[in-house]
Image (tube, rainbow, N blue to C red):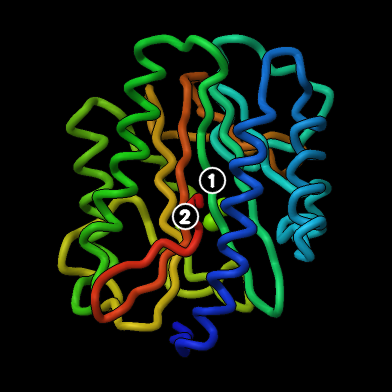
Amino acid sequence: MIIVKSAKEIEKMRVAGRITAGALAAAGEAIRPGMTTRELDKVIHHYITSHGAKPSFLGYAGFPASACISVNDTVIHGIPSNEKIHEGDIVSVDVGAYIDGYHGDSAKTFAVGEISDDAKRLLASTEESLYEAIKIAKPGMRIGDLSAAIAEYNESRGFSVVRQFVGHGVGRDLHEDPEVPNFGKAGHGPRLVAGMVIAVEPMINLGKPQVKVLSDGWTTKTADGSLSAHFEHTIAITSEGAVILTKPE
Ligand code: MG
Ligand code: MG
């Protein structure tokens, strides 16, 4: 069931979104070669808790950290560890903050130092496709319109779309209806109405779309070992169009 939010609820989600965005920005400022993904997780944890919020992911279905940190061929759900970040890596950081009953959810893939041209193109395409979808997200459009726009943008540039994981509604729960796939048919799926809040989150591979989940039950890698990027915003649908709740200041 899709839960439509009141203006008052969306105001609360703005607060959660702002803290989520701040935590992601703090990660971007801290990230450097030689640090471990656990150290980066600590920066995020500190930011969220010092702003009076709780990390949405910590303890979610048993997840052991405050952020998902996914390096290079890890698509999503990387568990912070003693793994070191290196010059030339791409690092996807996925963050959620919970405050006053509502969640924010946002992700970004960071380039660490100088990255390959392929990696640069992959990051640009993934991020741009997110904004293409946000641009058309308004009442009357359908989820499938967003999905098709994301797939078309990336596939026309030679990249592939992960199909096993999708975006979602956000609110009192981190994951609510509807599902927001990054592939699909324009004109299909639930219709957007003012008050819907969704996380749009393209996960795009340099190689083939297939992914595999490791035995830890979380870490999701590309099956062919190619690089993968992930950008996500939580957006509210209003009569004037989409408002990004997890926009950096
Ligand atoms: Mg996320
Ligand atoms: Mg999400």
Total marks in image: 2
Q: In which quarter of the image is ligand 2?
A: bottom right
> For numbered disc 2, what is the local secondary structure?
loop
Label ID, residue 107:
1
Residue 162: horizontal and vertical position, in percent? 41, 41
Query: Quick check: 1 left or right of 140?
Result: right
The image quarter in which residue 192 lies: bottom left
Above or below, 229 relative to 98: above
Q: Is residue 61 visible?
A: no
Label ID, residue 231:
none
Residue under the point 75% across and 58% down: 55
> Of the residues shown, which amino acid type is indicated by label 2?
Lys
Mark nearer the N terminus (1 vs 2):
1
Residue 110: horizontal and vertical position, in percent? 53, 29
Viewer-closest of 212 and 105? 105
Residue at the spot of label 2: 247
Viewer-closest of 168 and 56? 56
Ligand 1 within 8 A of label 1's CB? yes
Q: Can residue 176 be seen in this view?
A: yes
Query: Quick check: 35 left or right of 113?
Result: right
Above or below, 31 relative to 236: above
Above or below, 148 relative to 129: below
Residue under the point 67% across and 19% down: 32
Which residue appears farthest toward the front when viewing the image?
Answer: 249
Viewer-closest of 57 and 222? 57
> Of the residues shown, which amino acid type is indicated by label 1?
Ala
